């Protein structure tokens, strides 16, 4: 691509009279910034005059499309004008609110970024475009056979939610961003879970999901993809390990049940001892308890009722022990 800069100056005037610098050997820093930003940093200098009394300087962009591209573009526009309004059917395109169109002209990415939403125009002969969906997409990571840090094989699957953040980069930097993200998610799942033991995998799912999301988001950023969320769906253990864990859990439950029963008996024994001490201090309380027991027995429909013998009657028949004698 060529740019012609015409300056009204005498033939014998030097380049430094207009832009500064030496006599014909101007450094690259003396090039006007507007030409530098537009045509790059590679220039070809022709200090000799091409016409009199106008001196012409040509800047050439070797990386530009070239004259052939300019001719094809001009021919395409002329063809559109010649076939107007039929050419509108091929030139006018529409993208939805959640879509963007990345346009390539003669293989080069068109300036201005992605087009949309709404109507945009293309040149049918030289332009190609690709639509990119900006909505959040979810996919299932296939079950991965993972060897944990404590040498236990588990099968884990997950769900990944992502969206395209920069459609231009997603099209130009990676061949298929969706397929690449899926493969990277499966690899990241194996790498992250390989550093955890079985107990951490089963109990720290939220932490593992956050670690995977951060790792995937950082890796897919050069592709223009934003990973929004990662969720661990299921952790499947081998059958033998499931049986062993079930037996261990059952044994732990039985042990806890025995401990609870023992604690209950201990508390009941202490309560009974306290009640006996209270009754021993008051003979009337013992008599009331005796009458209450008889009332409870008589309320039931029994054919035989056994009356307990009062203990006070048996005191006269019981031989006192030596300790009781000393107490007396």
Image: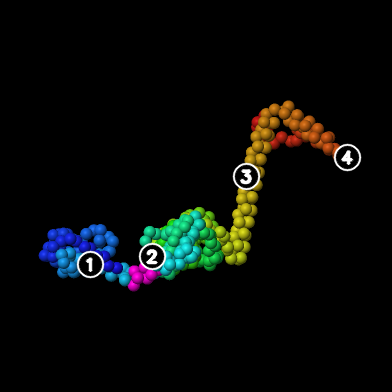
Which badge, 4 or 1, is on the more N-terminal residue? 1
**Residue at image point 45% right, 67% down:** 83
**Residue at image point 78% right, 34% down:** 293
Front: mark 2 or 3: 2
Mark 1 crowdedness (10 Å alpha carbons): few <14, some 14-19, many ≥20: some
Residue 2: image x %, image y %? 27, 67
Residue under numbered circle 3: 263
Q: Which of 84 and 27 is in front in this view?
A: 84
Tell me whether circle 2 and circle 1 mark residues in contact (CB < 8 Å).
Answer: no
Tell me whether circle 4 and circle 1 mark residues in contact (CB < 8 Å).
Answer: no
Front: mark 4 or 2: 2
Residue under numbered circle 4: 303
**Residue 7 covered by magenta stretch:** no
Which badge, 2 or 3, is on the more N-terminal residue? 2
Tell me whether circle 3 and circle 1 mark residues in contact (CB < 8 Å).
Answer: no
Which badge, 4 or 2, is on the more N-terminal residue? 2
User: Residue placed farthest to the bottom in the image?
Assistant: 68
Q: Distance between the residues labelled 3 and 1?
A: 99 Å
The boundaries of the magenta stretch are: 68-77
Residue under numbered circle 1: 58
Residue 117: image x %, image y %? 47, 56
Front: mark 3 or 1: 1
Residue under numbered circle 2: 109
Q: How far apart are marks 3 and 4 (CA)?
A: 38 Å
Q: Is residue 55 above or below residue 251?
A: below
Q: Residue 219 carries which label?
A: none
């Amino acid at each position: 691509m060529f740019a012609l800069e015409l300056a009204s100056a005498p033939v014998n005037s030097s380049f430094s009279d207009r832009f500064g610098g030496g006599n014909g050997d101007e450094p690259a820093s003396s090039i006007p910034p507007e030409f530098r930003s537009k045509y790059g940093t590679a220039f070809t200098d022709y200090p000799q005059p091409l016409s009199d009394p106008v001196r012409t300087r040509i800047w050439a962009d070797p990386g530009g499309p070239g004259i052939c591209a300019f001719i094809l573009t001009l021919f395409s526009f002329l063809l559109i004008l010649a076939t107007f309004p039929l050419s509108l059917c091929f030139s006018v395109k529409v993208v939805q609110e959640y879509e963007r169109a990345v346009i390539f002209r003669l293989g080069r990415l068109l300036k201005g970024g992605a087009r949309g939403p709404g109507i945009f125009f293309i040149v049918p002969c030289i332009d190609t475009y690709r639509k990119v969906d900006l909505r959040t997409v979810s996919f299932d990571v296939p079950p991965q056979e993972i060897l944990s840090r404590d040498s236990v094989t588990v099968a884990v699957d997950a769900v990944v939610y992502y969206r395209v953040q920069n459609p231009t980069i997603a099209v130009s930097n990676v061949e298929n961003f969706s397929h690449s993200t899926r493969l990277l998610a499966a690899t990241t799942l194996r790498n992250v879970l390989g550093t955890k033991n079985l107990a951490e995998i089963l109990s720290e799912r939220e932490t593992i999901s956050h670690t995977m999301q951060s790792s995937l988001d950082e890796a897919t950023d050069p592709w223009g993809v934003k990973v929004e969320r990662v969720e661990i769906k299921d952790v499947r253990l081998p059958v033998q390990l499931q049986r062993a864990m079930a037996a261990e859990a059952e044994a732990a439950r039985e042990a806890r049940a025995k401990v609870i029963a023992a604690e209950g008996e201990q508390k009941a024994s202490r309560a009974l001892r306290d009640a006996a001490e209270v009754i021993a201090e008051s003979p009337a309380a013992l008599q009331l308890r005796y009458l209450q027991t008889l009332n409870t027995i008589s309320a039931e429909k029994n054919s035989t009722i056994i009356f307990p013998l009062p203990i006070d009657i048996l005191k006269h028949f019981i031989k006192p022990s030596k300790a009781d004698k000393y107490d007396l």
